[in-house]
Amino acid sequence: MKTLYKSSLLSPDSTEGFQAIKLSADKGAASNWSVKSYTLRGGLQEGVQVVEVNNGKLTFAILPTRGMGIWKGQCGDITLGWDSPVKDPVNPAFINLQDRGGLGWLKGFNEWFVRCGLNSMGAPGMDTVLDYSGNEFDVPLTLHGNIANVPARAVSVEITDEAIIVKGEVDETMMFGPALRLNTVIRTEFRSGKMTIIDTVTNLGNNPQEHEMLYHINYGAPLLEKGSRMIAPFKQVAPRDPRSAAGIDTFDAYGAPQSGFVEQVYKYELAGKRGSRETMTMLRNGTGDKASLLRFTLKDFPCFTLWKNTAGKADGYVTGLEPATSYPNSRRFEREKGRVITLAGGESRTTTLSIETLDTKKAIKAAEAEIKTLQKTAKAKVHRQPLSSFSG
């Protein structure tokens, strides 16, 4: 692999801030690709930085200002993302995570790919931490943590003869508290429908720190429609609550937009390959000619949650596929169940996930066959009522 271009777009040592770039095919690399950066203006998106990557087939927009999340994508005629009531990327300066009892995160929620973490994620709730004197006290933790509303401190782009690579560094740190750093590598090969996200989270301090991470990967039309299905190999699946239990017979299937629909959530224990623990999940449309495929390992993300919100289009017709280190309950509950990771001082943890858009029935059937093969390694159990070990 030969590097053709490499540049820093944002650096903590820079006095110029985010650099404007516009790159396109040259120097013998694959044709019809481009990378450009720009800053959004007006309203709540004021000052949000965007790095737009086009590999010749797949286009996606990274948001350094919002924790290196991915706003939206396009692969051929397949839109990747969803139509949120939040129309523009929101600058974190306008977000108060404590709003509405800790639900302020939702005021900026419109991305295709958004991270939840790094120190906590999941439902808002009280938890016990230590103050600067080492005394325990209770604090309210907000929905899905902080990382999606923390601007990156460093961003760079690299062009090789095979791929476009964007790197970012985001710090979730404070004095007398968690000091965690996210280093992300977002890579896509030329003319591919796939991108790979490699995240490394490091405890910058000397003392142990708790760490949770969930990827909220969200889809609306055209992948989400009446007749769409979420296909995954699993050992067991259970509804989150009585509302979700009411839909257990169709937990992996979707209906048309329905005004007044109340969200349903299902917790999975997935099956994976023996040894490597590799697994996959796929959302495909009703006719089976469009799909998005996720690949990851259960070592990296042992928990998986399916979020269904097939509400009216204006209210956010969307589903979320959510690989995670734990389930999106309160951190106190997840700690009690032994699912919260602790990073020792200086310790790092690296995870890898790929997202691939499939646009032929042949490719989708091949992926379904692969999932069926994985399913043969485990007997699938569907629980009709919530499990106390999964939801609290």
Image (cartoon, rainbow, N blue to C red):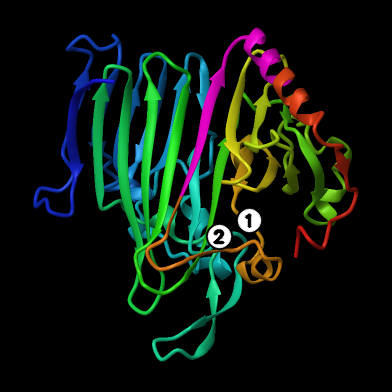
- Identified by mark 2, the residue type is Met
- Look at the image and tell me whether residue 88 can be seen: no
Q: Residue shown at 82%/52% (left/top)?
A: 243
- Identified by mark 1, the residue type is Ser
Real-space CA distance between mark 1 and mark 2, rounded to the nearest whole angstrom: 9 Å
Task: Specify start and end residues of the magenta stretch as a single range.
Answer: 350-368
Viewer-side label of 1, 2: 1
- Look at the image and tell me whether residue 170 can be seen: yes
Quarter of the view holding residue 289:
top right
Q: Where does the image place residue 374, in percent across and percent down from the top left? A: 74, 29
Q: Sequence order check: which comes first, mark 1 or mark 2? A: 2
| Of the pair 340 and 258, the residue shown nearer to us | 340
Q: Is residue 214 left or right of residue 14?
A: right
Say which element carries label 2.
Answer: loop
Q: Is disc 2 surrounded by few (<14), some (14 to 19) or many (20+) residues within 10 Å?
A: many
- In the rendered view, tell whether residue 80 sits above or below residue 63: above
Q: Residue shown at 21%/9% (left/top)?
A: 28
Where residue 326 is drawn, which disc sits there?
1
CB contact under 8 Å: marks 1 and 2: yes
Q: Where does the image place residue 130, in percent across and percent down from the top left? A: 48, 84
Q: Is residue 2 left or right of residue 346?
A: left
- In the rendered view, tell whether residue 61 sits above or below residue 129: above
Q: Is residue 300 left or right of residue 38?
A: right
Q: Where does the image place residue 272, in percent across and percent down from the top left? A: 70, 36
| Of the pair 86 and 392, the residue shown nearer to us | 392
Question: Pointer 2: what residue?
Answer: 121
Q: Residue shown at 38%/30% (left/top)?
A: 187
